[in-house]
Image (cartoon, coloured by chain):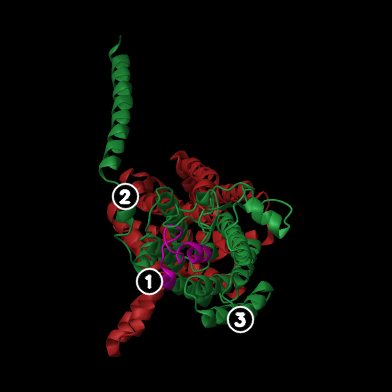
Chain colours: A green, B red
Amino acid sequence: MTSRRSTTVIAAATLVAAMGASVLLLRGIDRARPQATLDEVLLISSPKFLKRASLGYNGLMADIYWTRAVQYFGREHHADATEYKLLAPLLEITTYLDPKLLVAYEYGGNFLAPPPPGGAGEPERAVHLLEYGIQQNPDEWRLYMSLGHIYFLELKDYAKAESAFERGSRVPNAHPSLAVMAALMAQHTGNLDTARALWTATYQTATDKNIRDNAFEHLIALRVDTDVTRLQAAVDGFRQRTGRIPASLLELAAAEGWLGLPADPDHVPYMLTSDGRVEVRNPDNFPFITMGVPPGYKAPPPRFLHRPDN
Amino acid sequence: MRARVTAIASNTFREAVRDRVLYNLIAFVLLLSAAAVLVGQISIDIEKLVVINLGLTAVSMFGIVIAIFIGIGLVSKEIEKRTLYTVLSRPVRRWEFIVGKFFGLTGTLVVNTVFMAIGVFAALLYVEHKLVQSDGLILVALYFIVLQFVLVCSLALLFSSFSSPLLSAVFTFALFVIGSFAEDLRNFASMTHGLTRWVAVGLAYLVPNFSAFNIISSVAHGQPVAGSLVLHNTAYAVLYSAAVLAGAILVFEYRNLK
């Protein structure tokens, strides 16, 4: 082997071996320093500093931070996290860098406000984010929709919800559902029908798939809540009439003249417990339901990203 | 006169091509292709934004780096290789040499930008499957980026006419960074009082205003660009670079080349 060839072979072998070893080493470093990358990013938590440091290329910087926000929420959600501390700062940095990035406000409204595990449980910061978004994009009716949504569902503040929907309804080309929602809020109707109207509007108008999926899961949960409420009323009525609990939902269905057994949205029949409570058989399949669950039941993190049939 | 300037400009362009400057296009294509394919999978609803933001930022960054690193060597390299003496021993005036070098480098960057612009539109077409009318605004952003290059070229040439390549690079880059904060500087200056105010405001206006040329983010959102901004930016770039070139010519004219 000539001197030149041997040098080539040794150099090539060293390159491959050293590169492979460094990759393996990096994996070890990642295991030893979990979350390090994202924590380090947030060492620079000042949006103003980041905007300055981007030398005017803040659009690209915003895209990077937005991607990080999505990745962060997705990763934590997948790991069944119960808190999302970095979601709000990441979204605030993103929207400061690019105030026109509407999807960040909508995403924030949907996943920053709800309590864990479905969201970060920070409705006030979600409101702050959306108010900033409205200030920067006053003609975007979707932002008013998201704001009203938070006031109604998370903060139960119907007056502010009405104000948000009403302001949104005055925006040129606003979706007609905003005016309807404003009217419903004016009646202070914090019931299931109002919630259904709101989620339906969100489902119909959202452009982002995650937000649509989230709305769809809430609509499914509302249907279950409505079914359980109706069935429980029927059970209670049966008990008042006969002085006993129906032996099964089959007996109740026969007494009420129903054509079949009432079933949940997955076509699985509801069940009647021995103490007369109506429950769903698989509550884990309906992460946002508030009725029809066993006593002490703890809901798993919602899996609204994976339902294929909407 | 025009023939001599053109000859120097075309030789500068040929030299840049021989120096494999256009190889940066390969890195650019790889960057945009990766972004176009990957971003849709790891983010939400910003595929088009990323292609425009990343594409135009890369065009701008690559161009500025090329402008600085080629520009700083335009004069000093000729002196170091002693080719400058051959050129100036012919009927070529020193200012013609400077102007020719400037147009040669600017031409290189324009050609580079044209190829990159094709890449940006191709990536956009891949992501969106169609081009819409508002995508035409990208051309305006690209035009502003070229105006940035014109300024950077003139600055690099100015520093190259009297300083070493390393210092020229530092000075040019520093002025680019300071110029990116030009609007902030003017705001800060206006907060001072008395003589300090006049000096600070004067200095703030002397710094090249690069921030006015960056409309990437607004173009990515399809926001219209005022015609008056196009006119003002064009006039500003022409006037400022003419002033800087005049400075470079003055320095070079009186430089002792012995």
Q: Residue at x 52, y 46 (%)?
A: B41
- The picture places residue A141, in percent across and down from the top left corner, at 61, 73
- The picture places residue A254, in percent across and down from the top left corner, at 70, 54
Q: Is residue B200 magenta?
A: no
- The picture places residue A7, in percent across and down from the top left corner, at 28, 19
- Give the secondary structure at mark 1: loop
Whether residue A223 sits left or right of residue A25 in the image: it is right
Q: Residues within 10 Å of mark 1 (few under 14, many from 20)?
A: some
Spatial separation of the CA atoms under disc 3 and disc 1:
48 Å
Q: Is residue B139 visible?
A: no
Q: Give the quarter of the image for residue A239.
A: bottom right
The residue pinned by badge 2 equals A35
Chain letter of mark 2 equals A
Whether residue A24 sits left or right of residue A223 in the image: it is left
Chain letter of mark 1 equals B
Q: Closer to the camera: disc 3 or disc 1?
A: 3
Residue type beneath disc 3:
Glu
Q: Magenta residues?
A: A105-125
